[in-house]
Image (cartoon, rainbow, N blue to C red):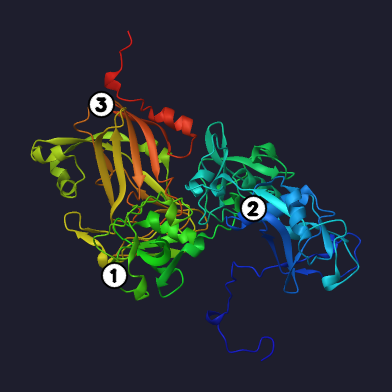
Amino acid sequence: NGWGVSDCKHTEDVGVVCSERRIPGFKFDDSVLNHIENINIQVEDTRIQAVLGASRKRLPITEGYVEVKEGGVWKQICDRNWTTKNSRVICGMFGFPGEKKYNVNIYKMTASRKKHRYWAYSIDCKGTESHLSACKLGNRISTATGENITCVNGMPAVVSCIPGPAFASGSRNGFRKAFRQAHPLVRLKGGAKTGEGRVEVLMNGEWGTICHDQWSLTAASVVCRELGFGTAQEAISGARLGQGMGAIHLNEVGCLGYEKSITDCKFTTDTHRCSHEEDASVRCNVPAMGFENQIRLSGGRIPSEGRVEVLRNHNGTLKWGTVCSDNWGILQAMVVCRQLNLGYAEHAFQETWYWQGDGSTDQVVMSGVKCSGTEMALSHCRHHSHVHCPRGGGRYAAGVSCTDAAADLLLNAKEVEYTSYLEDRPMQSLQCALEENCLASSAVNTSIERGQRRLLRFSSKIHNVGQADFRPRHGRHAWIWHECHRHYHSMEVFTHYDLLDLNGTKVAEGNKASFCLEDSECAPGIQRQYGCANFGEQGITIGCYDVYRHDIDCQWIDVTDVPPGLYIFVIHVNPQHDVAECDYSNNIMKCQCRISDQRAWMFNCHIADSFSEAIEDKFDNFKGLMTNQVPTR
């Protein structure tokens, strides 16, 4: 109707959601043309084409001709001006950290037997580029056109790449190996897909993040290669893959591209102006393993949900079938969503009668699946060698729903340390707590009129540092009413509290239901959304805290029967994985706890994965039974 002429309101504003999948190919920019005339050179795609028989049968493809697709035709690149720097870039593009030498004579013999169609240009890379498109275009190898282009005194360029530990031939443990180096100095946290996440580095025994000032593709690629992946697809700033915790170790990281570790790059440790809202992340190139072709979701309303069906070898033939839902949970669902590149797990379903799949795939072909949650494929998880599923498939087949974003709960360890104390409380005021199993089993024998219980009290402050709100799994219609306390429980088990002796034996325990999951406090600029008043919606908004004060019922461990001594105190948030999170490894907090006749001390409180394994082992100090050691005199 013309500019400014409308009868619309802002409630009718249009928007777009762009796909993460990019159109294949790229154009060589004029600025990187080495004295070549201004012409439009479009490359539609790039690949490593396996040539030798042994390479064709294995995934990932690590060796073969480098080919580009131009005008719908795959063409080889002449090796006359080819360098190892070019090979390094190609290997990085396809998810490999490095390149190696190959048997030139075999490829010369193979190339002499076949006519090749060559691309007209050569490539000139520095070796630090993250993609071929960032390299300079070299000289034309021939003035001919079309099929007449030849590679005089040369042959097709070949690359041979070194796969990372998790992708090496014969590796069965998948993603876990990529993060099990002998002495890892770098790790990725919070990412949905293999090879992506917030970057954390180990310094002085403590894990910490990197501030995103001057964070670049070159630095991100150093991280990716160090972890056994290829170059970086993206250097992500602004804590877009979740906020870290504790220290921020590095800032203004500057890399040349050939460093073995991110700690070999230039950086400053002046991070006082940084916050965890500026944590740096990466998304790495990973090898094409074909795992996504071994699994599918069937019957869902949208592509990110449905009954899980896997392709398995059955009596010598590949057959699609379902997965037994016995003990199927969120950790298994996390692996399925990762394998299908569908993000994080949102729910795991043990009944899928409402998702009618193909009847021919009802047979259960996989059972007893137990995952750590970090595997790249469901087949990497432990499972039965012979299918055993009493419930059968069909309506009881396993299912999942996936989501692009997930919450991430983090307990404030110092809050526990500062607020802990002992209280002797009369049994008369603990009847509701007894009813809700918040006291030790011996409490049933305690006199209501004259008895009392000794309680180790503390506050808990739980922060949602993820990318989505933390919401109870069940809606309000399924919450459980507790008459004594006169409130609803939106989650029956929200936290576990355990007191362990130095042998690792549990000597006391407690648990906390989420009777009021709400935004108690929020970071500046974030609006509170959830409140418990008037049967309101419960949850924790991104960037907000839920605070359970030390003076409310069940915010304790009953230590009446615990003798004085040194103990380890453990809090586990969301212990049953009832609600999906992007990272469960930071849900456990540990403290050293000393209890005397009159008081208790909490010290060295920390999130369980915030220090090196060596320091954590020393903290736990479980060197076997203390009772069978020879006493020192």
- Residue 203 placement: quadrant: top right
Against 267, is 563 above or below?
above
Circle nearer the N terminus (2, 3): 2
Residue at which label 3 appears: 598
What kind of residue is marked 3? Gln
Q: At x 54% / y 47%, what residue is drawn?
A: 166
Q: Mark 1, residues whose alpha carbon is within 10 Å: few (<14), some, or many (≥20)?
A: some
Q: In the shown orientation, is residue 362 left or right of residue 409?
A: left
In this figure, which residue is indicated by the disc labeled 1?
395
Q: Nearer the viewer, mark 1 or mark 2?
A: 2
Q: Residue 625: in sight, yes or no?
A: yes
Quarter of image, res 300: bottom left
C-alpha distance separating marks 2 and 3? 66 Å
The residue that appears at 37% across and 56% down in the rendered structure is 330
Q: Which residue is mark 2?
A: 62
Identified by mark 1, the residue type is Arg
Quadrant, the N terminus: bottom right
Which residue in the rendered view is the most extreme toward the top?
633
Is residue 29 positioned above or below 562 on the image?
below
Front-most of 192 and 213? 192
Horizontal and vertical percent for residue 423? 24, 35
**In this view of the protein, can residue 404 be seen by the observer?**
no
Q: Is residue 391 above or below residue 298?
A: above
Question: Which mark lies nearer to you, 2 or 3?
Answer: 2
For numbered disc 2, what is the local secondary structure?
A: loop
16 vs 265, nearest the viewer: 265
Q: Position of residue 488 (x, y in %)?
A: 25, 59
For this rendering, which residue is in front, 68 or 403?
68
Q: Earlier in the sequence, mark 1 or mark 3?
A: 1
